[in-house]
């Protein structure tokens, strides 16, 4: 779930993967629940343009004992077409869209460690900025317009290194159960979700494999395998400060307990966390309204 955005240049390319993930966290709850206080979806603008800024501290990788800190500013665009859509609920063709189910496109990602030295990986290849995207089935268990909307998602995403010509790094599967209260005027909105992230052998090797030439006395060679990567508990808080300005805070607790590669020497702690805070500002919107 994300707001789409336009990006260009080498700098934007390197931020692409994590920009997708941040936009996904920040872009919940624009579609209002049915109530006397909130406009119907047909009263929302057909398109909106804005800018998004965020500061983030994230785990270097699941099981790492070091944080990666970044700040970024990106433009975003929303388009609420009847067939083509890029908004808070996804981006793509609305091939299947009912009150209880939709087939959409899912995005995620994470920053690479860049020039920062991750002690556990000293002398090893650096982790790049990872961008993930692919299809997602989304079931609204108590209806799309419920005040506290309960949903189950099943995304399958290809993983690509955004700093290395989008070189393929594997495939991830992340079923998630979530509850969400969408933003209304002068009120807080929230999202809370629990998920399990699985990866194929290539993705597992990206995070956890130690080649014989990379082995050290305290870091023996290790052959990674596919399976569970981590359990995740995700939370988001949102509030509209003005009709154009939104504040968002988000966090994640991540555990590799029981994960397929828990015994990798690169796993230095079982539980870790990531968090951030950001603002979105809408500077233009269409007079024409969306039709659903």
Image (spheres, helix red, strand yellow):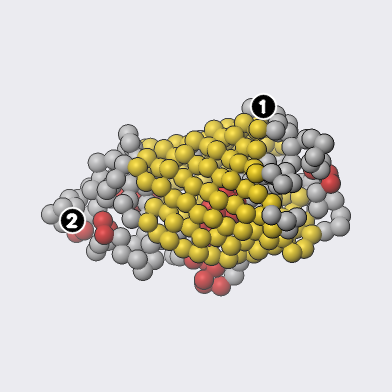
Identified at 27% across, 48% down, the residue is 268
In the shown orientation, is residue 274 left or right of residue 280?
A: left
* Residue 176 image label: none
Residue 40 coordinates in the image, percent (x, y)? 81, 41
Res. 223 in view: no
Identified at 36% across, 69% down, the residue is 115
Q: Nearer the viewer, residue 65 or 13?
A: 65
Res. 278 in view: yes
What residue occupies the far front of the structure in this picture?
Answer: 186
**Which residue bears the numbered disc 2?**
215
In the shown orientation, is residue 2 left or right of residue 44?
A: left
Query: Relative to 208, does residue 146 appear above or below in the rendering?
Result: above
Quadrant housing residue 34? top right
Query: Relative to 139, does residue 280 appear above or below in the rendering?
Result: below
**Which residue bears the numbered disc 1?**
142
Crowd tier of the residue under label 2, counting other residues whose Cα lies within 10 Å: few below 14, some 14–19, many 20 or above: some
Q: Nearer the viewer, residue 251 or 292?
A: 251
Quadrant housing residue 232? top left
Question: What count of labels does the image hold?
Answer: 2
Residue 82 coordinates in the image, percent (x, y)? 79, 46
Cα–Cα gap, marks 2 and 1? 51 Å
Q: Secondary structure at mark 2?
A: loop
In the shown orientation, is residue 112 left or right of residue 211?
A: right
Q: Which quadrant would the C terminus be assigned to in this image?
A: top right
First in sequence, mark 2 or 1: give its number. 1
Residue 148 coordinates in the image, percent (x, y)? 65, 32
Identified at 32% across, 51% down, the residue is 64
């Amino acid at each position: 779930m994300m707001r789409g955005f336009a990006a260009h240049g080498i700098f934007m390319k390197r931020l692409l993967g994590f920009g997708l993930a941040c936009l996904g966290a920040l872009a919940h709850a624009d579609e209002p629940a049915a109530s006397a206080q909130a406009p119907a979806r047909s009263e929302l603008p057909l398109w909106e343009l804005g800018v998004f800024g965020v500061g983030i501290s994230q785990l270097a990788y699941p099981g790492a004992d070091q944080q990666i800190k970044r700040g970024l500013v990106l433009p975003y665009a929303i388009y609420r077409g009847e067939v083509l859509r890029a908004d808070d609920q996804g981006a793509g063709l609305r091939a299947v869209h009912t009150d209880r189910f939709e087939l959409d496109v899912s995005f995620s990602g994470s920053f690479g460690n860049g020039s920062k030295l991750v002690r556990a990986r000293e002398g090893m290849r650096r982790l790049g900025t990872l961008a993930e995207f692919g299809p997602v089935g989304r079931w609204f268990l108590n209806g799309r317009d419920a005040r506290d909307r309960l949903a189950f998602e099943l995304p399958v995403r290809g993983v690509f290194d955004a700093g290395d010509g989008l070189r393929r790094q594997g495939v991830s599967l992340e079923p998630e159960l979530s509850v969400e209260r969408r933003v209304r005027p002068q009120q807080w909105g929230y999202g809370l979700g629990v998920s399990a992230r699985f990866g194929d052998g290539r993705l597992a090797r990206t995070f956890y494999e130690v080649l014989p030439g990379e082995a050290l006395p305290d870091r023996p060679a290790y052959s990674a395998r596919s399976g569970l990567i981590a359990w995740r508990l995700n939370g988001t808080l949102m509030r509209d400060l003005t009709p154009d300005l939104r504040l968002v805070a988000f966090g994640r607790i991540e555990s590799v307990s029981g994960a397929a590669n828990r015994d990798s020497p690169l796993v230095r702690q079982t539980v870790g966390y990531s968090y951030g805070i950001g603002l979105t500002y809408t500077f233009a919107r269409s007079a024409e309204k969306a039709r659903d």
